Amino acid sequence: MESSMAATPESPNRVTLGLMDGRSLSGILPKFSPLMAQLLFDPDTPSGEKPRRMLLARDEIAFVGFHRQPNQTQHPQMRGMVPLKVKTVGQILFEVVSLIGADNQVGFYGYPIDPTHLFYRIFFYGPGVRQRERMEPLGELLMGEGVIDRVDLDRAIAVQQAERSKPLGQILVEQNKVAADKVEEAVSIQVRKRMRLGEVLVEAGLVKPEDIEEALKEQQKKRGKKLGDILIEMGVVDEVHIATALALKFHLPFVDLDEYPIDPKVLDRVAHRIVHKFGILPVREDERTLTIAISDPLATGYYDVLRFQVKKAIKEVVATKTQIEAKLVELLGAGAEDDADIDALAEDLVLEHGISAQDEPLNEFLLKRGADEAPIVKLVNQLIWEGLSSRASDIHLLPQEKGLVVAYRVNGDLIHDRLLDKRIQAQVVSRIKIIAGMDISERRLPQDGRLLLRRPKGAPVEFRVSAIPNVFGESIVMRVLNKEMAVDLHSLGLRPEDEARMVDLSQRPFGLILATGPTGSGKSTTLFAVLQGVVDRPVHVISIEDPVESQIEGVNQVQVNAKIGMTFARILRNILRHDPDVIMVGEMRDQETASIGVEAALTGHLMLSTLHTNTAADTIVRLIDLGLPTYLIAPALLGIISQSLVKKLCPDCRTQIDPDDDIFDILQGLGLPCPPPLWQAGKGCPTCHDSGYAGRAMIYEFLEITPPVRQAIKEGKMGKELEEVAVAGGMLLKRQHALELARDGVIARDDLLRILL
C-alpha cells in the first residue's frame, strides 16, 4: 500500500524536514514522492519577509514529517504493521508503527504511535536512520509470559484510550490483573531481547539465534570486546558479510577501499585524534557533504563530533574494519595515545573490583605521566589533562542512563568527547569530590568545591567544582579558573578611542561603570581589566565576588557566603566603613545592592559592577526595574559597556567567501554598508587544534554618559530613544562592531548573521 502511494507525488503538505546536518526546517512541501531526487520546499519566513523557495537534494534530508491535520487522530490500522523505535541523525528518537516489507530503495514510512504527536506520518530516508529496532509491546510480552490473557489486555487498552496519560502497566496493576514486579520483569525481558547487531545478522540469514546467544555469553567473559569480533572469532561469519548486512539494513553503499577513490586532502578535514578514536575514514568532499567510510552504522558517537567540526552534511559508506584500519595506518600513521590511554584505563576499571580512591596531591607530572597510582586516579588525571590541553573552559561529567558522558567546553561550544562505562561512574565522581574537598557521602544535595593544580613552571591552575544530583547520578562541572588574570584593557580588543575613554573613566574619583551582557559574555573579565589599571594608583580597592575566581595583587577581595548571611548587599554596606576608594561588586542582583551601589557612587567612590542586559540602552530600564529613580541614575553613571563573546576564526586556515543575498538584504534593512568578501571557518590546522577557531572575540557597544545622554536619562528616555541620542554622540552599536570584525576576518559570516538578526 505504501509503495503504491509513493509512486505518485502528493499534494501540498505542511511538513518539517529533518536535515542530514542536524537542522530542521518547517514549511510547505508542494509535492512529494520518496523517489524524487530533489524536493521543492517553501520554508516558513518571518512576517513581512518575502518567501524563499529552496531546492533540496534527497541526500540532504534525513526525514520528512507530515504535520497532523485536525481529522487525523489515529494512524491507519493495517495488517502487518509493527511498532518500531527509529533513531535518526542528531539522535532524534521516534516511536512509530510501520508496515512490514514496505521499505523501498530509499526508505520507509512510519506513523507516530502517540496520537497527539505533531507528525501524522513520517518518511525516513535510509541514510538518515541511525537505528531501527522492533518494539515488543508490553501487553504482548505479558501475554507471552502467561501473566495475562487477551481479554485482560483488551480491557486495559480500552481504559488507556480514555486515560492516555497512564502507562499500560500501571492500568494492569490497578486492575489487579498483574503484580508490579511482573511488569518490571517483562520490561527487563524486553530490554534483554534487543540484540541489535545480532538481530541484523539473524534477519539477514547469516547466523542463527543460538550463535548470538553463545556469542553474548562469551562477551560476558571478554568485557569490552564487540559482539561482531566474537562472532568472527567463532567462525560463524566474516567481517565482509557483517559489513554488507549492515549496509543493506541501513540503505548505505558497501565499498572496497582498495578500489574506492580516496582524496588525500580530505583526511585533513577531520582532527586525526577523532579519526583514530572512532575508526572512521574521510574519503571525499564536495561543497555540501563530507563522505566517510565506517564499519559499524550502529555506532553513532562520531556523528555529532563531525557535524560540529566540518559544518557539513555527513554521508556514510560502509567498509570493513580491517580495511579502514589499514588505510588509517597507511595514510595517517599510528593512532592517538591519549585516547587509547583513557579508554584502556576505563576498561581496567570495569574489570577491577574494590578500587579505593586515595587523596593524593594533584600535580602536573601526574596529569601527564599517570605514575603508578590506582587506575581511577590515573583516569581522572588524564581527563583533566586532556581538558587543559584542549584549552577547555569547563570539564563536564554528565551521568546518563547508558554511561558517563565526558564533554569539554571549547571556544564556547560544549563538545562531547566520550562515553565512559556506567560501572565506573561512581568511582570517577567520588575521586573528583575527594580532591575538590567535598563530602563523598552526600549524594542528595548540590555541593561546591575547589582544587588547585600546581605546576613546576608557570602559575597554578585552579578549578571551581560543582556537583549536582540528577536522575542518573551526580553531574560534575569543573570550571578552569585563571589564577593570573593578566588581562588589561588593551587585551580586550577595544577600539583605540573606546580604550582611551574607558581609561579616562577609570581615573575618575567617583561614579558607576557597568559591564552588561548575558551569562558567560566576559563581564567579570572586563571589570578585572579596569581594575588592573587602577591598582597601581595610591587607592584602596575592594572587590565583592561570588566566588573569587582570580586573584589580583593589590585588591582586597571578599567572597560572598550566603549561608552565613554574607550577601552582596551586607558586605557592600559594611565595606563602606572600610575606607575604600574603588569598589567592584560582582553583580547587582537585587534592589538593595543596586541602591547601596548607586549611593556609594554618588558619595565619593568609584563603583564597578555587572548587570544582565542585552544592550547598553536597556541597562537604564533594568536599573529602573530595580527601583532606582532616573534622578539618581543619571548623575551616578559614568559609562556602560554591553558585550558578548563570539568565536574567532583561526587566521591560519580561515577561508574567504563572497557575501550572499541574505547578508545584503539584512544590512540594507539596517542601513549598514555592504561588506567586502567575508570569511568562514577553515578545515582546521595545528594552530587551532583542527577546530577552525582560535579563541573568542568581544563584540561590544560602549555608552559613555555624556551631558546629552545624561539629560536624556533625566527626561525618561529609554530603549531606542536613548540609543538614538547615544549614536548621535558617536556610539557604535554591537552590530556595527560585528560588521567591522567580519570585514577584518576575525569572525565568521554565520556569526555575523546571528548578531544582525
Image (cartoon, rainbow, N blue to C red):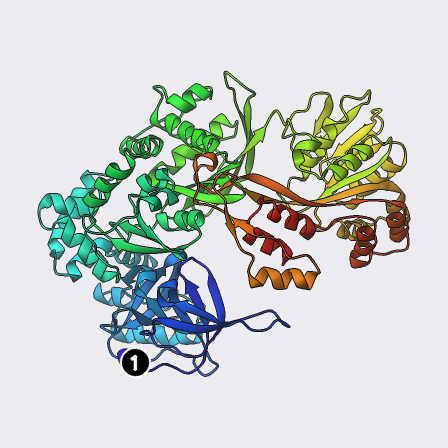
Q: Residue at x 18, y 39 (%)?
A: 221
Residue found farthest to the top:
456
Residue 735 in sight in this render: yes
Residue 653 picture location, percent across and down: 47, 41
Residue 28 horizontal side relative to residue 612, left or right? left
Identify the image quadrant of the N terminus: bottom left
Say which element carries label 1. helix
| Image height of 102 relative to 245, above or below | below
| Image height of 622 relative to 468, above or below | below
Residue 611 in sight in this render: no
Q: Nearer the viewer, residue 394 or 73?
A: 394
Residue 157 horizontal side relative to residue 14, left or right? left
Amino acid type at mark 1: Ala
Q: Residue at x 88, y 48 (%)?
A: 710
Residue 3 picture location, percent across and down: 27, 78
Residue found farthest to the front:
676
Residue 596 picture location, percent across and down: 83, 39
Q: Residue at x 46, y 21 (%)?
A: 364
Residue 193 horizontal side relative to residue 375, left or right? left
Residue 281 horizontal side relative to residue 474, left or right? left
Residue 702 picture location, percent across and down: 75, 44
Identify the image quadrant of the C terminus: bottom right
- Which residue in the structure is indicated by mark 1? 7
| Image height of 542 relative to 317, above or below | above
